[in-house]
Image: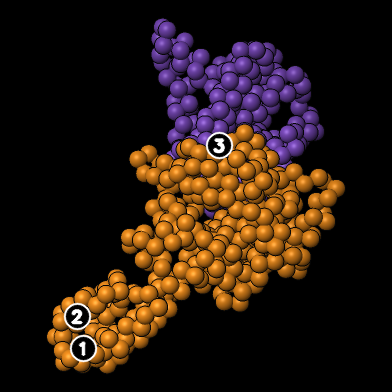
Amino acid sequence: MDLSRSIKFDNVSKRYGAFHALRDVSFDVNEGEIVGFLGPNGAGKTTAMRILSGFFPPSSGRIFVCGMDMSKHPHKAKRAIGYLPETVSLYPDMRVIEYLRFVAKLKGVPSHEIQGHVRSKMSFCGLLDSGHRLIGRLSKGYRQRVGLAQALVADPPVLVLDEPTTGLDPTQIKEIRELIRALGQNRAIILSTHILPEVSMLCSRVMMINQGQILASGTVPELASCLKDREAVHIKIKNSEDQERALKILASVPGVEALKIAEEVRGETFISFETSPDEDLRPLITKLFVEQGISLTEIQRLQLSLEDIFLGLLKDGKLGRRFS
Amino acid sequence: MKKVLTIARKEFTSSFHSWLGVLTATLFFLAAGVFFVILILNYVKISMNPQQYGLSNFSGISQTQYIFGSFFSNLSIMFLFLVPILTMRSFAEEKRQETLELLFTYPLSDYEIVVGKQLGILLFFGVLLLPLFGYLAVFRWIGGEFDWGPVLLGYAGFWLLGAAYLAAGVFFSSLTKSPIISALGTFGVLLLFWILDYVDDVATGPWARIFSELSPLVHYKNFTLGILDVQDVVYFGFFFFYFLFLTLRSIETRNWKS
Protein backbone atom coordinates (compact mmCIF):
# COMPACT_ATOMS: atom_id res chain seq x y z
CA MET A 1 0.00 0.00 0.00
CA ASP A 2 1.34 3.40 -0.96
CA LEU A 3 1.38 5.51 2.17
CA SER A 4 3.14 8.51 0.71
CA ARG A 5 -0.17 10.03 -0.35
CA SER A 6 -1.37 13.02 1.59
CA ILE A 7 -4.85 11.56 1.98
CA LYS A 8 -5.87 7.97 1.46
CA PHE A 9 -9.37 6.56 1.95
CA ASP A 10 -9.41 2.79 2.00
CA ASN A 11 -12.88 1.22 1.65
CA VAL A 12 -14.44 3.70 4.01
CA SER A 13 -18.10 3.23 4.96
CA LYS A 14 -20.29 5.13 7.36
CA ARG A 15 -23.66 3.90 8.56
CA TYR A 16 -26.24 5.63 10.72
CA GLY A 17 -28.39 2.70 11.75
CA ALA A 18 -29.74 1.29 8.50
CA PHE A 19 -28.81 4.37 6.49
CA HIS A 20 -25.58 4.21 4.51
CA ALA A 21 -24.05 7.67 4.33
CA LEU A 22 -20.91 6.32 2.64
CA ARG A 23 -20.38 2.96 0.95
CA ASP A 24 -16.89 1.59 0.39
CA VAL A 25 -15.32 4.83 -0.67
CA SER A 26 -11.68 4.66 -1.73
CA PHE A 27 -9.57 7.43 -3.20
CA ASP A 28 -6.34 9.26 -2.62
CA VAL A 29 -5.07 12.78 -2.95
CA ASN A 30 -1.48 13.93 -3.42
CA GLU A 31 0.35 17.02 -2.37
CA GLY A 32 -0.26 19.92 -4.74
CA GLU A 33 -3.68 18.65 -5.77
CA ILE A 34 -6.99 20.41 -5.25
CA VAL A 35 -9.74 17.82 -5.41
CA GLY A 36 -13.35 18.85 -5.71
CA PHE A 37 -16.15 16.84 -4.15
CA LEU A 38 -19.23 17.35 -6.22
CA GLY A 39 -22.65 16.11 -5.34
CA PRO A 40 -26.19 17.09 -4.40
CA ASN A 41 -27.10 17.80 -0.80
CA GLY A 42 -27.14 14.64 1.26
CA ALA A 43 -24.79 12.82 -1.11
CA GLY A 44 -22.23 12.10 1.58
CA LYS A 45 -19.80 14.95 0.96
CA THR A 46 -20.03 16.34 4.46
CA THR A 47 -19.90 12.87 6.01
CA ALA A 48 -16.70 12.09 4.11
CA MET A 49 -15.19 15.39 5.20
CA ARG A 50 -16.21 14.94 8.81
CA ILE A 51 -14.59 11.52 8.87
CA LEU A 52 -11.44 12.92 7.33
CA SER A 53 -11.36 15.80 9.80
CA GLY A 54 -11.59 13.36 12.70
CA PHE A 55 -15.01 14.55 13.87
CA PHE A 56 -16.22 10.96 13.99
CA PRO A 57 -14.70 7.64 12.95
CA PRO A 58 -15.94 5.60 9.97
CA SER A 59 -18.03 2.45 10.55
CA SER A 60 -15.44 0.50 8.59
CA GLY A 61 -12.42 1.15 6.44
CA ARG A 62 -9.23 3.05 7.09
CA ILE A 63 -8.00 6.57 6.53
CA PHE A 64 -4.38 7.61 6.19
CA VAL A 65 -3.23 11.20 6.46
CA CYS A 66 0.38 11.70 5.35
CA GLY A 67 0.93 8.01 5.98
CA MET A 68 -0.53 8.04 9.49
CA ASP A 69 -3.43 5.76 10.28
CA MET A 70 -6.20 7.99 11.62
CA SER A 71 -7.52 5.33 14.00
CA LYS A 72 -4.08 4.58 15.46
CA HIS A 73 -2.63 8.08 15.69
CA PRO A 74 -5.68 10.34 15.82
CA HIS A 75 -3.83 13.31 17.36
CA LYS A 76 -0.96 13.26 14.89
CA ALA A 77 -3.33 12.84 11.95
CA LYS A 78 -5.64 15.59 13.17
CA ARG A 79 -2.69 17.94 13.54
CA ALA A 80 -1.92 17.41 9.87
CA ILE A 81 -5.41 18.54 8.87
CA GLY A 82 -7.00 21.94 8.72
CA TYR A 83 -10.78 21.81 8.55
CA LEU A 84 -13.23 24.48 7.52
CA PRO A 85 -16.76 23.27 8.28
CA GLU A 86 -19.78 23.98 6.14
CA THR A 87 -21.28 26.47 8.55
CA VAL A 88 -18.33 28.37 9.88
CA SER A 89 -19.31 28.53 13.51
CA LEU A 90 -16.92 30.36 15.75
CA TYR A 91 -17.26 31.70 19.27
CA PRO A 92 -19.08 35.02 18.78
CA ASP A 93 -17.88 36.44 22.10
CA MET A 94 -14.18 35.99 21.36
CA ARG A 95 -11.89 38.43 19.60
CA VAL A 96 -10.26 37.26 16.37
CA ILE A 97 -6.71 37.23 17.72
CA GLU A 98 -7.79 35.69 21.01
CA TYR A 99 -9.60 32.92 19.14
CA LEU A 100 -6.68 32.15 16.85
CA ARG A 101 -4.33 31.97 19.84
CA PHE A 102 -6.75 29.57 21.50
CA VAL A 103 -6.74 27.37 18.40
CA ALA A 104 -2.94 27.55 18.16
CA LYS A 105 -2.60 26.32 21.74
CA LEU A 106 -5.05 23.48 21.16
CA LYS A 107 -3.22 22.44 18.02
CA GLY A 108 0.01 22.36 20.00
CA VAL A 109 1.90 25.28 18.48
CA PRO A 110 4.80 25.97 20.90
CA SER A 111 4.03 28.95 23.18
CA HIS A 112 6.94 31.10 22.05
CA GLU A 113 5.88 30.75 18.40
CA ILE A 114 2.19 31.47 18.87
CA GLN A 115 2.42 35.26 18.54
CA GLY A 116 4.25 35.21 15.20
CA HIS A 117 2.36 32.20 13.92
CA VAL A 118 -1.07 33.71 14.51
CA ARG A 119 0.08 36.98 13.01
CA SER A 120 1.25 35.32 9.81
CA LYS A 121 -2.07 33.50 9.39
CA MET A 122 -3.97 36.73 9.99
CA SER A 123 -1.87 38.52 7.44
CA PHE A 124 -2.39 35.74 4.88
CA CYS A 125 -6.16 35.89 5.31
CA GLY A 126 -6.28 39.70 5.39
CA LEU A 127 -7.30 39.92 9.03
CA LEU A 128 -4.52 42.09 10.44
CA ASP A 129 -6.85 45.06 10.88
CA SER A 130 -9.61 43.01 12.49
CA GLY A 131 -7.61 41.26 15.20
CA HIS A 132 -9.37 42.95 18.09
CA ARG A 133 -12.88 42.78 16.71
CA LEU A 134 -15.43 40.39 18.21
CA ILE A 135 -16.10 37.47 15.90
CA GLY A 136 -19.84 37.88 16.39
CA ARG A 137 -19.67 41.38 14.88
CA LEU A 138 -17.79 40.36 11.74
CA SER A 139 -19.45 40.10 8.32
CA LYS A 140 -19.95 36.66 6.82
CA GLY A 141 -16.98 37.12 4.50
CA TYR A 142 -14.66 38.04 7.34
CA ARG A 143 -15.93 35.18 9.47
CA GLN A 144 -15.09 32.87 6.58
CA ARG A 145 -11.58 34.31 6.60
CA VAL A 146 -11.27 33.64 10.32
CA GLY A 147 -12.51 30.11 9.62
CA LEU A 148 -9.84 29.68 6.99
CA ALA A 149 -7.21 31.18 9.29
CA GLN A 150 -8.05 28.68 12.06
CA ALA A 151 -7.75 25.85 9.52
CA LEU A 152 -4.29 27.12 8.58
CA VAL A 153 -3.03 27.34 12.15
CA ALA A 154 -0.20 24.85 12.74
CA ASP A 155 0.46 24.70 8.96
CA PRO A 156 -1.36 21.46 8.15
CA PRO A 157 -0.27 19.77 4.90
CA VAL A 158 -3.90 18.75 4.27
CA LEU A 159 -6.85 21.11 4.07
CA VAL A 160 -10.49 20.04 4.11
CA LEU A 161 -12.86 22.79 3.07
CA ASP A 162 -16.61 22.13 3.17
CA GLU A 163 -18.35 24.49 0.77
CA PRO A 164 -15.92 27.33 1.37
CA THR A 165 -17.72 29.89 -0.76
CA THR A 166 -21.37 29.33 0.21
CA GLY A 167 -23.23 32.44 1.25
CA LEU A 168 -20.57 34.92 0.23
CA ASP A 169 -20.98 37.79 -2.21
CA PRO A 170 -19.17 37.65 -5.58
CA THR A 171 -16.18 39.73 -4.46
CA GLN A 172 -15.70 37.64 -1.33
CA ILE A 173 -16.04 34.43 -3.36
CA LYS A 174 -13.29 35.65 -5.66
CA GLU A 175 -11.02 36.48 -2.73
CA ILE A 176 -11.54 33.15 -1.00
CA ARG A 177 -10.93 31.29 -4.27
CA GLU A 178 -7.65 33.12 -4.75
CA LEU A 179 -6.58 32.19 -1.24
CA ILE A 180 -7.44 28.55 -1.87
CA ARG A 181 -5.56 28.53 -5.15
CA ALA A 182 -2.48 29.97 -3.46
CA LEU A 183 -2.73 27.38 -0.69
CA GLY A 184 -3.12 24.48 -3.11
CA GLN A 185 0.39 24.81 -4.47
CA ASN A 186 2.11 22.90 -1.71
CA ARG A 187 -0.75 21.20 0.07
CA ALA A 188 -3.40 18.60 -0.55
CA ILE A 189 -6.81 20.21 -0.55
CA ILE A 190 -10.23 18.62 -0.65
CA LEU A 191 -13.09 20.98 -1.14
CA SER A 192 -16.76 20.26 -1.55
CA THR A 193 -19.11 22.39 -3.52
CA HIS A 194 -22.29 22.27 -5.50
CA ILE A 195 -21.26 25.19 -7.65
CA LEU A 196 -20.08 23.48 -10.82
CA PRO A 197 -18.03 26.29 -12.39
CA GLU A 198 -16.07 26.52 -9.15
CA VAL A 199 -14.81 23.02 -9.72
CA SER A 200 -13.44 23.75 -13.18
CA MET A 201 -11.94 26.98 -11.88
CA LEU A 202 -10.15 25.60 -8.84
CA CYS A 203 -9.78 21.88 -8.93
CA SER A 204 -7.24 19.71 -10.64
CA ARG A 205 -9.44 16.68 -10.05
CA VAL A 206 -13.12 16.07 -9.54
CA MET A 207 -14.99 13.38 -7.68
CA MET A 208 -18.71 13.10 -8.19
CA ILE A 209 -20.54 11.63 -5.25
CA ASN A 210 -24.09 10.52 -4.90
CA GLN A 211 -25.81 8.29 -2.36
CA GLY A 212 -22.56 7.67 -0.58
CA GLN A 213 -20.69 6.39 -3.60
CA ILE A 214 -18.15 7.89 -5.94
CA LEU A 215 -19.83 7.89 -9.33
CA ALA A 216 -16.89 9.24 -11.23
CA SER A 217 -13.52 10.71 -10.63
CA GLY A 218 -11.00 12.22 -12.97
CA THR A 219 -8.75 15.12 -13.69
CA VAL A 220 -10.08 18.17 -15.44
CA PRO A 221 -8.36 17.22 -18.76
CA GLU A 222 -10.01 13.80 -18.52
CA LEU A 223 -13.32 15.47 -17.96
CA ALA A 224 -12.70 17.74 -20.89
CA SER A 225 -11.97 14.81 -23.18
CA CYS A 226 -15.18 13.26 -22.05
CA LEU A 227 -16.97 16.46 -22.86
CA LYS A 228 -15.46 16.39 -26.32
CA ASP A 229 -16.89 13.04 -27.26
CA ARG A 230 -20.41 14.03 -26.35
CA GLU A 231 -22.55 16.87 -27.38
CA ALA A 232 -26.15 17.87 -27.12
CA VAL A 233 -28.49 18.85 -29.95
CA HIS A 234 -31.45 21.09 -29.25
CA ILE A 235 -34.37 21.19 -31.64
CA LYS A 236 -37.33 23.55 -31.60
CA ILE A 237 -40.50 22.65 -33.49
CA LYS A 238 -43.36 25.03 -34.18
CA ASN A 239 -46.45 22.91 -33.50
CA SER A 240 -46.74 20.77 -30.45
CA GLU A 241 -49.13 18.44 -32.37
CA ASP A 242 -46.09 17.30 -34.33
CA GLN A 243 -44.30 16.31 -31.18
CA GLU A 244 -45.11 12.61 -31.35
CA ARG A 245 -44.07 12.26 -34.98
CA ALA A 246 -40.87 14.22 -34.40
CA LEU A 247 -39.87 11.99 -31.52
CA LYS A 248 -40.55 8.90 -33.61
CA ILE A 249 -38.35 10.16 -36.43
CA LEU A 250 -35.52 11.10 -34.10
CA ALA A 251 -35.67 7.77 -32.31
CA SER A 252 -35.13 6.01 -35.63
CA VAL A 253 -31.97 8.01 -36.42
CA PRO A 254 -28.85 6.07 -35.48
CA GLY A 255 -26.55 7.82 -32.96
CA VAL A 256 -29.34 9.59 -31.08
CA GLU A 257 -29.22 9.01 -27.33
CA ALA A 258 -31.00 10.35 -24.27
CA LEU A 259 -33.85 11.72 -26.34
CA LYS A 260 -36.28 13.84 -24.36
CA ILE A 261 -38.71 16.72 -24.49
CA ALA A 262 -36.94 19.51 -22.67
CA GLU A 263 -39.67 22.12 -22.54
CA GLU A 264 -42.97 23.24 -24.04
CA VAL A 265 -43.48 26.96 -24.36
CA ARG A 266 -46.45 28.65 -26.05
CA GLY A 267 -47.16 25.75 -28.39
CA GLU A 268 -43.50 25.34 -29.32
CA THR A 269 -41.67 22.22 -28.24
CA PHE A 270 -38.00 21.93 -27.37
CA ILE A 271 -36.49 18.51 -27.87
CA SER A 272 -32.97 17.59 -26.88
CA PHE A 273 -30.75 14.57 -27.38
CA GLU A 274 -27.14 13.61 -26.98
CA THR A 275 -24.88 12.38 -29.71
CA SER A 276 -21.25 12.00 -30.65
CA PRO A 277 -19.65 15.09 -32.19
CA ASP A 278 -17.95 13.15 -35.01
CA GLU A 279 -21.06 13.15 -37.08
CA ASP A 280 -23.25 16.16 -37.70
CA LEU A 281 -26.83 14.87 -37.70
CA ARG A 282 -28.40 18.24 -38.39
CA PRO A 283 -28.72 18.04 -42.22
CA LEU A 284 -30.22 14.55 -42.00
CA ILE A 285 -32.74 15.56 -39.34
CA THR A 286 -33.69 18.74 -41.21
CA LYS A 287 -34.28 16.70 -44.34
CA LEU A 288 -36.41 14.10 -42.53
CA PHE A 289 -38.52 16.75 -40.81
CA VAL A 290 -39.13 18.64 -44.06
CA GLU A 291 -40.18 15.41 -45.77
CA GLN A 292 -42.70 14.73 -43.00
CA GLY A 293 -43.95 18.30 -43.06
CA ILE A 294 -42.89 19.17 -39.50
CA SER A 295 -42.03 22.83 -39.23
CA LEU A 296 -38.62 23.11 -37.69
CA THR A 297 -37.71 26.53 -36.32
CA GLU A 298 -34.36 25.87 -34.73
CA ILE A 299 -31.66 23.23 -34.57
CA GLN A 300 -28.53 23.75 -32.55
CA ARG A 301 -25.44 21.86 -31.42
CA LEU A 302 -24.28 22.44 -27.88
CA GLN A 303 -21.29 21.15 -25.95
CA LEU A 304 -22.29 19.18 -22.89
CA SER A 305 -21.59 21.18 -19.78
CA LEU A 306 -20.34 19.79 -16.51
CA GLU A 307 -23.91 20.22 -15.35
CA ASP A 308 -25.27 17.91 -18.06
CA ILE A 309 -22.72 15.25 -17.26
CA PHE A 310 -23.48 15.55 -13.61
CA LEU A 311 -27.23 15.29 -14.11
CA GLY A 312 -26.72 12.39 -16.48
CA LEU A 313 -24.64 10.63 -13.86
CA LEU A 314 -27.20 11.20 -11.19
CA LYS A 315 -29.86 9.71 -13.41
CA ASP A 316 -28.26 6.48 -14.49
CA GLY A 317 -24.56 6.58 -13.68
CA LYS A 318 -23.98 5.77 -17.35
CA LEU A 319 -21.07 8.08 -17.95
CA GLY A 320 -19.23 6.81 -14.94
CA ARG A 321 -17.23 4.28 -16.92
CA ARG A 322 -15.58 6.95 -18.97
CA PHE A 323 -13.88 8.49 -15.98
CA SER A 324 -12.69 5.59 -14.00
CA MET B 1 -2.79 18.80 30.54
CA LYS B 2 -1.82 22.05 28.83
CA LYS B 3 -4.76 21.68 26.49
CA VAL B 4 -7.12 21.01 29.40
CA LEU B 5 -5.97 24.28 30.96
CA THR B 6 -6.39 26.13 27.66
CA ILE B 7 -10.00 25.01 27.44
CA ALA B 8 -10.59 25.70 31.14
CA ARG B 9 -9.23 29.21 30.73
CA LYS B 10 -11.41 29.90 27.72
CA GLU B 11 -14.45 28.60 29.56
CA PHE B 12 -13.60 30.68 32.62
CA THR B 13 -13.04 33.95 30.77
CA SER B 14 -16.10 33.53 28.58
CA SER B 15 -18.23 33.21 31.75
CA PHE B 16 -16.88 36.57 32.83
CA HIS B 17 -17.37 38.13 29.43
CA SER B 18 -21.05 37.27 29.31
CA TRP B 19 -23.56 39.50 31.06
CA LEU B 20 -25.22 36.34 32.35
CA GLY B 21 -22.08 35.31 34.22
CA VAL B 22 -21.58 38.72 35.78
CA LEU B 23 -25.27 39.01 36.70
CA THR B 24 -25.26 35.56 38.28
CA ALA B 25 -22.15 36.38 40.29
CA THR B 26 -23.64 39.65 41.51
CA LEU B 27 -27.00 38.13 42.42
CA PHE B 28 -25.32 35.28 44.24
CA PHE B 29 -23.17 37.70 46.22
CA LEU B 30 -26.16 39.85 47.17
CA ALA B 31 -28.45 36.95 48.06
CA ALA B 32 -25.73 35.38 50.22
CA GLY B 33 -25.34 38.76 51.92
CA VAL B 34 -29.06 38.92 52.66
CA PHE B 35 -28.98 35.41 54.19
CA PHE B 36 -25.99 36.36 56.27
CA VAL B 37 -27.45 39.62 57.58
CA ILE B 38 -30.78 37.97 58.46
CA LEU B 39 -28.96 35.25 60.43
CA ILE B 40 -26.92 37.81 62.34
CA LEU B 41 -30.03 39.85 63.18
CA ASN B 42 -31.80 36.67 64.29
CA TYR B 43 -28.88 35.72 66.48
CA VAL B 44 -28.82 39.17 68.03
CA LYS B 45 -32.56 39.01 68.70
CA ILE B 46 -32.38 35.59 70.37
CA SER B 47 -29.33 36.46 72.41
CA MET B 48 -31.12 39.53 73.82
CA ASN B 49 -33.94 37.46 75.23
CA PRO B 50 -33.27 33.70 75.11
CA GLN B 51 -36.13 32.73 77.46
CA GLN B 52 -38.69 34.06 75.02
CA TYR B 53 -37.47 31.52 72.49
CA GLY B 54 -37.63 28.69 74.98
CA LEU B 55 -33.92 28.67 75.62
CA SER B 56 -32.92 28.69 79.26
CA ASN B 57 -29.23 28.91 78.64
CA PHE B 58 -27.85 30.76 75.65
CA SER B 59 -24.17 30.34 76.30
CA GLY B 60 -24.15 26.88 74.72
CA ILE B 61 -24.95 28.19 71.28
CA SER B 62 -21.88 29.49 69.58
CA GLN B 63 -21.90 32.13 66.92
CA THR B 64 -19.99 29.82 64.62
CA GLN B 65 -22.60 27.12 64.91
CA TYR B 66 -25.70 29.27 64.84
CA ILE B 67 -24.70 31.71 62.13
CA PHE B 68 -22.34 29.80 59.88
CA GLY B 69 -23.98 26.41 60.22
CA SER B 70 -27.31 27.86 59.16
CA PHE B 71 -25.68 30.13 56.61
CA PHE B 72 -24.17 27.26 54.66
CA SER B 73 -27.21 25.06 54.90
CA ASN B 74 -29.46 27.92 53.72
CA LEU B 75 -27.04 28.82 50.97
CA SER B 76 -27.42 25.38 49.39
CA ILE B 77 -30.85 26.40 48.13
CA MET B 78 -29.05 28.85 45.85
CA PHE B 79 -27.78 25.91 43.84
CA LEU B 80 -31.28 25.39 42.45
CA PHE B 81 -30.81 28.42 40.25
CA LEU B 82 -27.04 28.82 40.27
CA VAL B 83 -26.12 25.41 38.84
CA PRO B 84 -28.55 25.41 35.88
CA ILE B 85 -27.38 28.89 34.88
CA LEU B 86 -23.67 28.17 35.21
CA THR B 87 -23.81 24.91 33.30
CA MET B 88 -26.51 25.42 30.67
CA ARG B 89 -24.14 26.97 28.16
CA SER B 90 -21.17 24.66 28.53
CA PHE B 91 -22.07 22.07 25.89
CA ALA B 92 -25.57 23.00 24.77
CA GLU B 93 -24.55 26.45 23.58
CA GLU B 94 -21.57 25.04 21.70
CA LYS B 95 -23.81 22.47 20.10
CA ARG B 96 -26.34 25.12 19.16
CA GLN B 97 -23.69 27.35 17.62
CA GLU B 98 -21.97 24.27 16.17
CA THR B 99 -18.62 25.39 17.56
CA LEU B 100 -18.20 21.98 19.15
CA GLU B 101 -17.76 20.39 15.73
CA LEU B 102 -14.57 22.32 15.16
CA LEU B 103 -13.28 21.52 18.63
CA PHE B 104 -13.63 17.80 17.87
CA THR B 105 -11.43 18.15 14.81
CA TYR B 106 -8.49 19.55 16.76
CA PRO B 107 -5.84 17.17 18.11
CA LEU B 108 -7.64 16.77 21.44
CA SER B 109 -9.05 13.83 23.33
CA ASP B 110 -12.68 13.93 24.35
CA TYR B 111 -11.68 13.77 27.98
CA GLU B 112 -9.52 16.86 27.57
CA ILE B 113 -12.56 18.77 26.33
CA VAL B 114 -14.86 17.49 29.08
CA VAL B 115 -12.35 17.94 31.90
CA GLY B 116 -11.32 21.37 30.59
CA LYS B 117 -14.88 22.60 30.49
CA GLN B 118 -15.68 21.18 33.91
CA LEU B 119 -12.54 22.76 35.36
CA GLY B 120 -13.40 26.15 33.89
CA ILE B 121 -16.82 26.08 35.51
CA LEU B 122 -15.39 24.93 38.84
CA LEU B 123 -12.93 27.81 38.76
CA PHE B 124 -15.69 30.28 38.04
CA PHE B 125 -17.74 28.81 40.88
CA GLY B 126 -14.68 29.05 43.15
CA VAL B 127 -14.37 32.72 42.29
CA LEU B 128 -18.04 33.20 43.18
CA LEU B 129 -17.21 31.99 46.69
CA LEU B 130 -14.31 34.38 47.23
CA PRO B 131 -16.39 37.47 48.03
CA LEU B 132 -18.09 35.49 50.78
CA PHE B 133 -14.85 35.81 52.73
CA GLY B 134 -15.59 39.52 52.73
CA TYR B 135 -18.61 38.76 54.92
CA LEU B 136 -16.28 37.09 57.40
CA ALA B 137 -14.26 40.30 57.61
CA VAL B 138 -17.43 42.34 58.14
CA PHE B 139 -18.52 39.88 60.81
CA ARG B 140 -15.21 40.29 62.64
CA TRP B 141 -15.45 44.04 62.27
CA ILE B 142 -18.87 44.25 63.94
CA GLY B 143 -17.48 42.23 66.82
CA GLY B 144 -18.46 38.67 65.96
CA GLU B 145 -16.37 35.67 66.87
CA PHE B 146 -15.97 32.41 64.99
CA ASP B 147 -13.75 29.37 64.78
CA TRP B 148 -11.89 29.01 61.51
CA GLY B 149 -12.15 25.21 61.43
CA PRO B 150 -15.92 24.75 61.07
CA VAL B 151 -16.23 27.84 58.85
CA LEU B 152 -13.62 26.61 56.38
CA LEU B 153 -15.18 23.15 56.50
CA GLY B 154 -18.49 24.77 55.61
CA TYR B 155 -16.88 26.47 52.64
CA ALA B 156 -15.25 23.23 51.56
CA GLY B 157 -18.54 21.36 51.86
CA PHE B 158 -20.35 24.04 49.89
CA TRP B 159 -17.72 23.86 47.17
CA LEU B 160 -17.86 20.05 47.08
CA LEU B 161 -21.65 20.00 46.85
CA GLY B 162 -21.43 22.67 44.17
CA ALA B 163 -18.83 20.72 42.21
CA ALA B 164 -20.99 17.59 42.31
CA TYR B 165 -24.09 19.48 41.18
CA LEU B 166 -22.14 21.31 38.46
CA ALA B 167 -20.92 17.99 37.07
CA ALA B 168 -24.57 16.88 36.85
CA GLY B 169 -25.45 20.19 35.16
CA VAL B 170 -22.67 19.81 32.59
CA PHE B 171 -23.94 16.32 31.84
CA PHE B 172 -27.43 17.65 31.12
CA SER B 173 -25.91 20.34 28.96
CA SER B 174 -24.15 17.69 26.90
CA LEU B 175 -27.46 15.98 26.15
CA THR B 176 -29.16 18.79 24.31
CA LYS B 177 -28.69 21.59 21.83
CA SER B 178 -30.82 23.95 23.85
CA PRO B 179 -29.43 25.77 26.89
CA ILE B 180 -32.98 26.27 28.17
CA ILE B 181 -33.73 22.54 28.14
CA SER B 182 -30.38 21.91 29.80
CA ALA B 183 -31.22 24.41 32.55
CA LEU B 184 -34.69 22.92 33.07
CA GLY B 185 -33.33 19.38 33.20
CA THR B 186 -30.66 20.35 35.71
CA PHE B 187 -33.19 22.24 37.80
CA GLY B 188 -35.47 19.18 37.78
CA VAL B 189 -32.75 16.88 39.03
CA LEU B 190 -31.59 19.26 41.73
CA LEU B 191 -35.21 19.60 42.84
CA LEU B 192 -35.36 15.80 43.01
CA PHE B 193 -32.32 15.77 45.28
CA TRP B 194 -33.98 18.42 47.39
CA ILE B 195 -37.10 16.28 47.69
CA LEU B 196 -34.96 13.26 48.54
CA ASP B 197 -33.86 15.14 51.62
CA TYR B 198 -37.49 15.57 52.72
CA VAL B 199 -38.44 11.98 51.93
CA ASP B 200 -35.55 10.96 54.11
CA ASP B 201 -37.20 12.77 57.03
CA VAL B 202 -40.51 10.89 56.74
CA ALA B 203 -39.27 7.47 55.60
CA THR B 204 -38.65 4.73 58.14
CA GLY B 205 -36.59 1.57 58.38
CA PRO B 206 -34.13 0.58 55.64
CA TRP B 207 -35.66 3.09 53.23
CA ALA B 208 -34.67 5.95 55.48
CA ARG B 209 -31.14 4.65 55.43
CA ILE B 210 -31.10 4.33 51.62
CA PHE B 211 -32.53 7.78 51.06
CA SER B 212 -30.15 9.40 53.49
CA GLU B 213 -27.15 7.67 51.94
CA LEU B 214 -28.24 8.81 48.48
CA SER B 215 -29.18 12.36 49.34
CA PRO B 216 -26.40 14.88 48.67
CA LEU B 217 -27.93 17.28 51.16
CA VAL B 218 -27.68 14.77 53.99
CA HIS B 219 -23.97 14.37 53.26
CA TYR B 220 -23.63 18.11 53.03
CA LYS B 221 -25.29 18.60 56.42
CA ASN B 222 -22.24 17.13 58.19
CA PHE B 223 -20.04 19.81 56.70
CA THR B 224 -22.35 22.58 57.91
CA LEU B 225 -22.23 21.10 61.39
CA GLY B 226 -18.46 21.19 61.31
CA ILE B 227 -18.06 17.42 61.02
CA LEU B 228 -15.51 16.09 58.54
CA ASP B 229 -16.36 12.53 57.55
CA VAL B 230 -14.34 10.76 54.85
CA GLN B 231 -17.55 9.06 53.71
CA ASP B 232 -19.03 12.40 52.72
CA VAL B 233 -15.94 13.42 50.78
CA VAL B 234 -15.92 10.07 49.01
CA TYR B 235 -19.63 10.45 48.24
CA PHE B 236 -19.14 13.83 46.55
CA GLY B 237 -16.06 12.61 44.74
CA PHE B 238 -18.01 9.65 43.40
CA PHE B 239 -20.95 11.87 42.46
CA PHE B 240 -18.64 14.26 40.61
CA PHE B 241 -16.67 11.66 38.67
CA TYR B 242 -19.75 9.64 37.86
CA PHE B 243 -21.33 12.57 36.06
CA LEU B 244 -18.00 13.47 34.45
CA PHE B 245 -17.93 9.95 33.07
CA LEU B 246 -21.53 10.21 31.84
CA THR B 247 -20.69 13.48 30.09
CA LEU B 248 -17.75 11.85 28.37
CA ARG B 249 -20.02 9.02 27.21
CA SER B 250 -22.66 11.44 26.01
CA ILE B 251 -20.03 13.34 23.97
CA GLU B 252 -18.88 10.08 22.40
CA THR B 253 -22.36 9.33 21.06
CA ARG B 254 -21.56 11.49 18.01
CA ASN B 255 -19.57 8.50 16.76
CA TRP B 256 -22.68 6.48 16.05
CA LYS B 257 -25.61 8.90 16.17
CA SER B 258 -26.68 10.83 13.09
The hue in which chain B appears in the rendered picture of the protein: purple
Element at label 2: helix
Chain letter of disc 3 in the image: B
Of the two numbered discs 1 and 3 in the rendering, the one whose residue sits closer to the viewer: 1
Residue at (53% x, 42% y) in the render: A10
> Mark 2 and 1 residues: CB-CB less than 8 Å, in contact?
yes
Crowding around mark 3 (Cα neighbors within 10 Å: few <14, some 14 to 19, many 20+) is many
Crowding around mark 2 (Cα neighbors within 10 Å: few <14, some 14 to 19, many 20+) is few
Judging depth in this view, the residue of B55 and B159 nearest the camera is: B159
Q: Are marks 1 and 3 on the same chain?
A: no
Q: Are marks 3 and 2 on the same chain?
A: no
Residue at (27% x, 80% y) in the render: A271
Query: On residue A289, which mark appears?
Result: 1
Above or below, B140 against B96 in this view is: above
Query: On residue B170, which mark appears?
Result: 3
| Residue B232 seen in this snapshot | yes
In the image, what residue type sits under mark 3? Answer: Val
In the image: residue B217, left or right of residue B26? left
